[in-house]
Amino acid sequence: DAGVTQSPTHLIKTRGQQVTLRCSPISGHKSVSWYQQVLGQGPQFIFQYYEKEERGRGNFPDRFSARQFPNYSSELNVNALLLGDSALYLCASSLVGDRTGGYTFGSGTRLTVV
Amino acid sequence: GEDVEQSLFLSVREGDSSVINCTYTDSSSTYLYWYKQEPGAGLQLLTYIFSNMDMKQDQRLTVLLNKKDKHLSLRIADTQTGDSAIYFCAGSNDYKLSFGAGTTVTVRA
């Protein structure tokens, strides 16, 4: 069974541009979360979506947005990129209500803003 | 929100036990997790403990939870070179995980 898949794996963008990152959850998982991991730090929560609805949002500016599709895959969009947006963006999927399984993470998308 | 603190570095000899410590502030966390991250990779769930438990053992891994002191630890028995990685503890509420900064474990021969 495939795990959480993210695309692309690496991306280089210029300041001011916009980027879209994609995530496919584990089959049967209906919840997708996004995290930002800056080098040398722990992941920081950005969004969680469940059944296409936003359940929670972290302390990130409105330049960050996301959505979830009927097949439970998700996209994270970041507008007006800043150098400080350079990070590893991690997607995690989970069975809502099944916290014992934890959140299964993908390998991430490494975004570099130049 | 939750603050989670961890010691940043740990060096251990191969075959010895490793103990990684974590403290958290949010007593409402229902689950506490340990994740492992190898270079260039995502996060791998190692184990978890429910907040009403004191200890959980899973093969070479032992998790201890002191709710009074809000202290969590992960013990890795018989540490191997493949255990070299960054280890994160995380607390959960309904919809998010709050991570510490991670402990870099280096296993030396």
Image (cartoon, coloured by chain):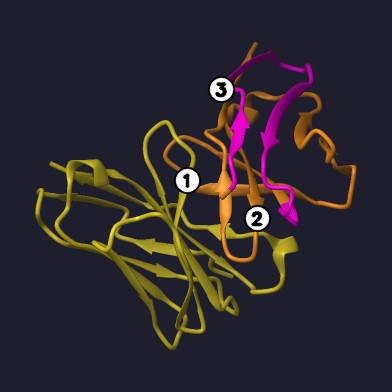
Chain colours: A yellow, B orange
Judge the density around disc 1: few (<14), some (14-19), many (≥20) Cα neighbours within 10 Å. many
Q: Which residue is mark 2?
A: B92
Q: Chain of mark 1?
A: A
Q: Secondary structure at mark 2?
A: strand
Q: Secondary structure at mark 1?
A: loop
Q: Chain of mark 3?
A: B
Q: Residue at x 56, y 77 (%)?
A: A27
Residue A81 lies left or right of residue B44; in this view the side is left
Q: Which residues are magenta?
A: B2-31
Mark 2 residue type = Ser
- In space, the residues marked 2 and 3 are separated at their CA atoms by 21 Å
Q: Which residue is mark 3?
A: B8
Mark 1 residue type = Pro
Q: Residue at x 39, y 73 (%)?
A: A74
In the displayed structure, would residue A15 be above or below residue B95?
A: above
Q: Nearer the viewer, residue B107 or A51?
A: A51
Q: Residue at x 43, y 88 (%)?
A: A70
In the displayed structure, would residue B84 be above or below residue A111?
A: above
Residue A91 percent across, percent down from the top left = 45, 60
Q: Residue at x 64, y 30 (%)?
A: B83
